[in-house]
């Protein structure tokens, strides 16, 4: 079978092709992205590698002899073999949006803390090739040094660089390497804040929980920096005497700087099992999780499920050095039914865990892909929740792959493809009993109608049945376009 390759303009339109005919040598497809790689050879190598520099990043389409689209992606590498050397130009190291992460040398509160410079952009390069981000991880330095390093990296790598590799070639040749659109997702950097809220510094103070009416309810406010689903709270506690009841922890919205009246969610913390000699973290899990909004202030209110008892109670560890800047502690006064600040001022030692749905995390990641894909759909229920953890400087596609590798709650694999119109689709593997294709003993592939399969790309992400009744889920297909031989890989 013969194939025809076309290089399109940056905006996807047909264009004049001064380089002559392009010969397709090989193509490959994967179940975690769709089109993976294509290798093209130029019949006339007089249109050299330097002439191809401005075409890097352009869309490429490959059609079969019936005019059906078989492969689509973008031009990633142009290389030319000459006697004694190989010339190569690609977009691998190019970066036209750069920031630097460093440990601050500035005196004062920020000394030794991790900081990040503002992003610096090169508009000319971005207009030619699209936005490609690079987050450079540096060591300890001042803000001025970090900004200088950022600007140096941007000026050095804002455009593709022609490289010369000494090697002996059998004959002059000009090749192009194209990659699938999913590879462009790694042109973005995924960053997010830690979803764990809390104050876990060294203890400096204590507070008795409900031994009398003035300690019946204790509240601590906190601010949510990254929205998520409330999961659990841990408090640093010990007991006095032999209490047999539990602590109740209610989550309430903020109302004019004090806890509101409505309990949004509640959990219980066992205090009978606490140590009487030392403080330890004790956890309560919220049975009715709620979504906490980013930027909002909430309160947790602690009370006892049993009666007041001055001989048996829990003791809460405090931070009277006020290391937590996003909240305050208040006590409820039953005499006038009001909340008043504790004296001396303090903050509770606490840790609140938030979860996120995998679907929500994927959608947040894909929202960064503007200019790469034209839309996205998640066509299956994943139904998994993960703790909100901090991420700094992870490439976007790598972060997406980490989530896809987890699969769904019912243990199905998650697959991904990008359509010719650049719409990304995430879907679950087909059922074990669903067989779209059959492989005969002589290596012939048959479609669902029993006819010989014409396009091997259709195998990716599908189940294949052998004549012995074994079923395989195809993860990768590679095709030699010259002789039609193909190689399959399965999960």
Image (cartoon, grey):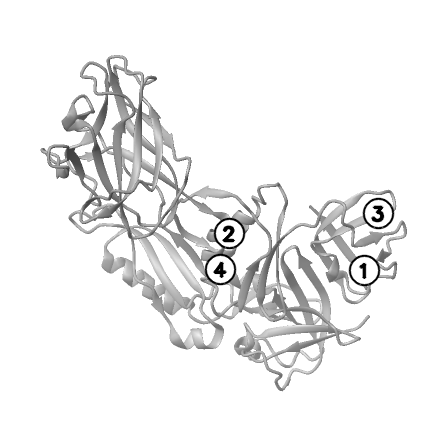
Q: Disc 2 vs disc 1: which is toward the camera?
A: 2
**What residue is rendered at 60% in x and 71% in y?**
421
Cα–Cα gap, marks 3 and 4: 37 Å
Q: Which residue is mark 4?
A: 366
Q: Secondary structure at mark 3?
A: strand
Left or right of 420 in this view: 271: left
- Number of marks drawn: 4
Question: First in sequence: mark 4 or mark 1?
Answer: 4
Nearest the eye: 255 or 8: 255
Label whose residue precedes the other's in the sequence (2 or 1): 2
| Numbered tag placed on residue 359 in the rendering | 2
**Residue at the spot x=14%, y=32% of the render?**
334
- State if disc 1 and disc 2 touch (CB < 8 Å): no
Q: Mark 3 = which residue?
A: 466
Q: Which element type, helix, strand or loop, lies under badge 1?
A: loop
Crowding at mark 3 (Cα within 10 Å: few <14, some 14-19, many 20+):
some
- Residue 333 x/y as whole percent: 13, 33
User: Which of pointers 4 and 2 indicates the residue nearer the eye?
Assistant: 2
Residue extending farthest right: 442
Under tag 4, what secondary structure? helix
**Residue drawn 23% across and 54% down?**
142
| Sequence order check, earlier mark of 3 and 1 | 3
Q: Mark 2 to mark 1: distance in Å?
A: 38 Å
Quarter of image, res 268 = top left
Label 4 Cα crowd, 10 Å radius (few <14 / some 14-19 / many 20+): many
Q: Nearer the viewer, mark 4 or mark 1?
A: 4
Q: Earlier in the sequence, mark 2 or mark 3?
A: 2
Q: Which residue is mark 1?
A: 485
How far separated are the C-alphas under marks 3 and 1?
18 Å
């Amino acid at each position: 079978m013969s194939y025809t390759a076309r290089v399109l303009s940056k905006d996807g339109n047909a264009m004049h092709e001064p380089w002559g005919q392009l010969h397709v040598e090989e193509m490959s497809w994967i179940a975690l992205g769709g089109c993976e790689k294509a290798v093209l050879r130029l019949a006339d190598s007089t249109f050299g590698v330097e002439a191809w520099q401005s075409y890097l990043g352009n869309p490429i389409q490959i059609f079969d002899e019936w005019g059906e689209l078989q492969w689509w992606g973008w031009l990633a590498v142009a290389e030319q073999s000459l006697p004694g050397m190989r010339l190569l130009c690609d977009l691998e190291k190019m970066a036209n949006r750069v920031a630097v992460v460093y440990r601050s040398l500035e005196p004062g509160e920020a000394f030794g803390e991790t900081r990040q410079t503002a992003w610096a952009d090169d508009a000319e390069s971005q207009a030619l090739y699209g936005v490609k981000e690079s987050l450079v991880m540096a060591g300890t330095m001042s803000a001025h040094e970090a900004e200088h390093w950022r600007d140096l990296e941007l000026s050095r790598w804002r455009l593709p660089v022609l490289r010369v590799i000494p090697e002996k070639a059998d004959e002059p040749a000009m090749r192009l390497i194209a990659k699938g659109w999913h590879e462009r997702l790694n042109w973005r950097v995924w960053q997010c804040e830690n979803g764990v809220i809390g104050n876990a510094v060294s203890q400096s103070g204590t507070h008795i929980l409900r031994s009398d009416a003035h300690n019946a309810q204790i509240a601590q406010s906190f601010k949510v920096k990254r929205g998520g689903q409330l999961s659990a709270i841990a408090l640093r506690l010990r007991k006095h005497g032999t209490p047999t009841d539990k602590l109740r922890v209610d989550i309430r919205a903020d109302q004019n700087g004090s806890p509101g009246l409505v309990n949004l969610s509640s959990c219980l913390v066992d205090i009978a099992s606490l140590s009487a000699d030392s403080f330890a973290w004790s956890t309560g899990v919220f049975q009715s999780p709620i979504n906490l909004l980013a930027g909002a202030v909430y309160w947790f209110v602690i009370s006892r499920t049993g009666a007041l008892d001055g001989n048996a109670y829990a003791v809460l560890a405090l931070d009277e050095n006020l290391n937590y800047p996003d909240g305050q502690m208040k006590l409820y006064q039953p005499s006038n039914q009001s909340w008043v600040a504790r004296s001396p001022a303090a903050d509770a030692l606490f840790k609140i865990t938030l979860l996120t749905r995998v679907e929500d995390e994927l959608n947040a990641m894909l929202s960064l892909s503007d200019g790469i894909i034209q839309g996205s759909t998640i066509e299956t229920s994943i139904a998994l929740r993960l703790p909100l953890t901090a991420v700094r400087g992870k490439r976007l596609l790598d972060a997406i792959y980490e989530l896809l590798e987890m699969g769904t709650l019912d243990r199905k694999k998650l697959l991904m493809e990008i359509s010719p119109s650049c719409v990304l689709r995430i879907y679950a593997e087909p059922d074990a009993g669903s067989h779209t294709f059959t492989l005969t003993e002589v290596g012939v592939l048959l479609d669902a109608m029993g006819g010989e399969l014409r396009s091997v790309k259709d195998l990716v992400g599908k189940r294949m049945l052998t004549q012995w009744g074994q079923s395989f889920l195809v993860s990768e297909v590679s095709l030699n376009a010259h002789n039609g031989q193909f190689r399959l890989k399965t999960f």
